[in-house]
């Protein structure tokens, strides 16, 4: 049981391609494309979005998060909410389509609830200053220093595993100052093999979060 | 006398005619400041509306507008789909089951349509969008509703919408794809405001 994702794009190819990309990192998550118009042109279709939302709601009752591209895709998604049986079970994420979808998919794969999945998507482009600022007022409750031992260092998949796993926990975590919930920020660290990662966590799950990262980083993310 | 389902069906048919007739004009307006698909999208959308209305003839004006809403949302493709769809949906809801629409109900339906467009597109007056046609139309319709003459309400709305469309020429676009152009959007008329005026003009013709 995981949160489902629906991708609304003006282009059928973009929706299908984004799903194809995200599924690689989240094999157990139901991700449905709703791209293009009914007759395969550029545009968005209420019918296609409704069909995807219905298929998602039939799958399980864990809620659905919708990712969109340009403005009218947002409008079509919002219009669809006027017609669905339970609008509260569908959340629209305000996030860049591809990066947001990958972050959302990883969070859903890790078992985050719908609000957590939406948050994971929206954290992608949040300015880095915000978490650090919040951090200044709140001393870390748990810390750890772990060496990156996998060959490729902090690339997309490790960043996705970190942000995805943390999205299911009630903790604010930074890794060398980057927001642990943001896959993009983690990747922007540009940390290669041998880099020491300083982890600071606060919140109810602070210790759990640091333990999680100790295990994950220590095992080289399961990579060579 | 009020407006019945046959008025609504004539309105939609005349709107479809207007979209077909002005297809190229709307495409040309959309070319410099959009993606030049507005005329094509509206024409296709209203042609699909005609098919749906013929398949399942509605019994009230409200039902005709709601069927139009669903069809436009599914068939138009661009931003105009959810915007006009929401407008027709809210207007249809405002008309309810009335067999005969009076002036006050008509004015409130126009207002509901405009409010739906604003809620969906989050545009304000002066953003160079269809709202700049609809808001003066709604105000004019409300002012004209006092005479209880539906034709006067329709005419007031259409004339105000046409003037509103012209008023978008000097505006700087702040919504939709035209907003990416910034200053370069100035001097072009907003295609959505023009199609809105055409549709409100069709409503006048339908009552003649």
Image (tube, grey):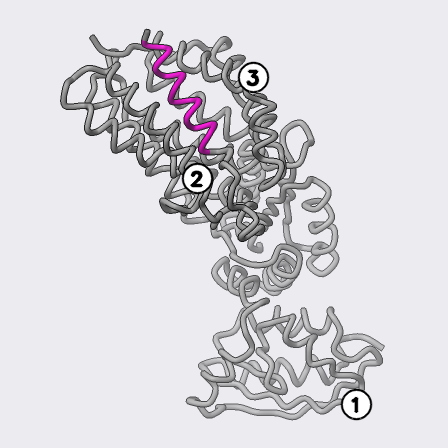
In the figure, residue B29 lies in which quadrant?
top right
Segment tinted magenta in the rendering: B193-207
Q: CA distance from mark 3 to mark 2?
A: 23 Å
- Does residue A202 lie above or below B13 as drawn? below
Crowd tier of the residue under label 1, counting other residues whose Cα lies within 10 Å: few below 14, some 14–19, many 20 or above? few
Secondary structure found at label 3: helix
Please report, as a chain letter, where disc 1 is located.
Answer: A
- If you read the primary sequence from the N terminus, does the residue marked by circle 3 or circle 2 appear first? 3
Q: Is residue B208 inside the magenta stretch?
A: no
The dominant secondary structure in magenta is helix
Q: Nearer the viewer, mark 1 or mark 2?
A: 2
For label 2, the residue is: B168
For label 1, the residue is: A194
- Does residue B88 lie above or below A217 as drawn? above
Q: Nearer the viewer, mark 3 or mark 1?
A: 3
Please determine if labels 3 and 1 lie on a single subunit: no
> Residue at (60%, 81%) from the top-left corner?
A178
Question: Considering the image in quadrants, where does the C terminus of chain B appear?
Answer: top left
Asked if residue B129 shows in the view, the reply is yes
Secondary structure found at label 2: loop
């Amino acid at each position: 049981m995981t949160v489902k994702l629906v991708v609304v794009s003006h282009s059928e190819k973009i929706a299908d391609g984004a799903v194809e990309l995200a599924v690689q990192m989240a094999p157990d998550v139901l991700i449905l494309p709703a791209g293009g118009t009914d007759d395969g042109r550029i545009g968005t279709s209420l019918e296609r979005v409704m069909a995807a939302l219905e298929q998602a709601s039939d799958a399980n009752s864990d809620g659905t998060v919708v990712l969109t591209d340009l403005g009218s895709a947002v409008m079509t998604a919002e219009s669809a909410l006027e017609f669905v049986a339970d609008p509260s079970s569908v959340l629209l994420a305000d996030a860049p389509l591809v990066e947001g979808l990958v972050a959302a998919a990883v969070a859903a794969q890790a078992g985050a609830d719908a609000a957590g999945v939406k948050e994971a998507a929206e954290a992608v482009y949040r300015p880095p200053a915000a978490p650090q600022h919040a951090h200044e007022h709140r001393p870390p409750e748990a810390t750890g220093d772990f060496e990156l031992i996998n060959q490729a260092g902090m690339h997309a998949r490790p960043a996705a595993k970190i942000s995805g796993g943390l999205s299911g926990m009630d903790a604010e975590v930074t890794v060398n100052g980057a927001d642990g919930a943001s896959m993009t920020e983690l990747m922007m660290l540009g940390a290669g093999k041998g880099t020491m990662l300083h982890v600071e966590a606060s919140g109810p799950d602070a210790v759990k979060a640091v333990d999680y990262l100790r295990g994950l980083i220590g095992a080289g993310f399961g990579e060579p | 006398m009020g407006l019945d389902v046959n008025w609504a069906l004539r309105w939609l048919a005349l709107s479809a005619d207007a979209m077909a007739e002005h297809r190229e004009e709307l495409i040309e307006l959309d070319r410099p400041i959009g993606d030049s698909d507005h005329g094509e999208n509206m024409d296709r959308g209203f042609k699909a509306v005609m098919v749906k209305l013929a398949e399942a003839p509605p019994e009230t004006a409200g039902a005709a507008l709601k069927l139009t809403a669903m069809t436009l949302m599914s068939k138009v493709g661009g931003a105009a789909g959810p915007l006009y769809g929401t407008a027709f949906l809210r207007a249809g809801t405002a008309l309810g089951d009335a067999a005969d629409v009076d002036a006050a109900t008509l004015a409130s339906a126009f207002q509901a349509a405009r409010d739906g467009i604003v809620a969906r597109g989050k545009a304000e007056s002066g953003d160079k969008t269809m709202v700049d046609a609809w808001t003066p139309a709604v105000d004019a319709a409300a002012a004209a509703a006092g005479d209880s003459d539906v034709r006067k309400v329709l005419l007031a709305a259409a004339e105000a919408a046409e003037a509103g469309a012209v008023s978008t020429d000097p505006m700087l676009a702040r919504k939709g794809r035209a907003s990416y152009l910034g200053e370069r959007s100035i001097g072009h008329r907003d295609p959505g405001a023009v199609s809105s005026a055409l549709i409100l003009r069709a409503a006048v013709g339908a009552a003649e």
